[in-house]
Amino acid sequence: MIILKSPSEIEKMRISNTIVAEILSEIKALIKPGVTTIELNERCEWLCHKKGAIPAFKGYRGYPCSLCTSVNEEVVHGIPSKRILKEGDIISLDFGVLYDGYFGDAAITVPVGVVSEKAALLIETTEQALYLGIEKAIHNNRISDISFAVQRHVESRGFSVVRKFVGHGIGKSLHEDPQIPNFGKPGQGPRLKPGMVLAIEPMVNAGRSEVEVLSDGWTAVTKDRSLSAHFEHCIAITENGAEILSKI
Ligand code: MF3
Ligand code: CO
């Protein structure tokens, strides 16, 4: 069941998502060779506390941290550790909060210093795919119109979309209906209506689309160990198109 949000609920979700976006941009500014991923998580928790928000991922199904830090071939759900970032790495930062009863959720992928041309193109393509998907998130379109736009752009660059993880509705719960795959034929699935709030989150691999989960039970990596990137925004469907809630 898709839960529609009232204008005042959307206002609250604008606030939760703005907190997420602000914290992500502060964490992004810290990304450089020599930094450990656990330091990023600690900073993230401190900022979250300062803003009076509750980290959404910590304890979610037993996830141990507040931030997901997925490096290079790690697709999503990388657990912060003493791992030291080095020049040429790419890192996906996925973060969510609960504030005033509503969730916010967003992700970005950031280069560590100077990265290969392929890594830079992967990051650029994934972010473009997110924005192309968002452009299709309009009243009377269907969910898979978003999916199709994402997949078409990614594959036009010779990359692949991850099928195992999908975007989602969001509100008083972190994950609500509908699911939003990053692949599929257009014109399928529920029709988009004003009041829907969606987390659209393409995960894109430089090589093949298959992923596997490491023995820590969380870290998803590409099966072929090719690089992977991830961008996510929460958007609200309005009468005049999609409003990005998780922008700064
Ligand atoms: N942004 C992700 C999601 O939407 C991260 C949540 S996974 C967690 O679904 F378990 F770490 F919380
Ligand atoms: Co999400």
Image (cartoon, helix red, strand yellow):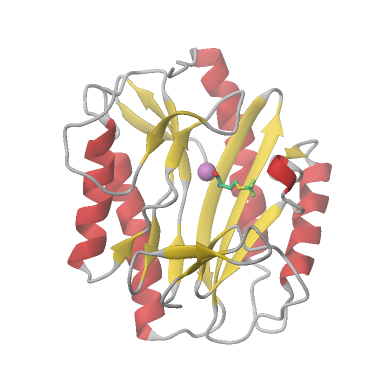
Q: Specify the quadrant that holds the N terminus.
A: top left
Q: Is residue 142 above or below residue 37?
A: above
Please state the horizontal and vertical placement of residue 9, each as a whole percent of the image.
Answer: 56, 17
Which residue is rendered at x = 35% and y = 81% of the image?
118
Question: In this orientation, which residue lies closer to the viewer: 162 or 152?
Answer: 162
Q: Quadrant of residue 89?
A: bottom right
Please state the horizontal and vertical placement of residue 77, each as a whole percent of the image.
Answer: 60, 57
Q: Could you tell me how many numbered marks the image carries?
A: 0
Camera sees residue 217: yes
Q: Is residue 219 above or below residue 140?
A: below
Please state the horizontal and vertical placement of residue 109, each as a whole percent of the image.
Answer: 50, 64
Please state the horizontal and vertical placement of residue 209, each as a whole percent of the image.
Answer: 34, 64
Residue 64 falls left or right of residue 233: right
Q: Residue furthest front?
A: 215
Which residue is rendered at x = 52% and y = 30% of the image?
170
Camera sees residue 199: no
Residue 198 falls left or right of residue 11: left
Residue 242 falls left or right of residue 169: left
Which residue is rendered at x = 74% and y = 75% of the image?
36
Which residue is rendered at x = 43% and y = 42% of the image?
167
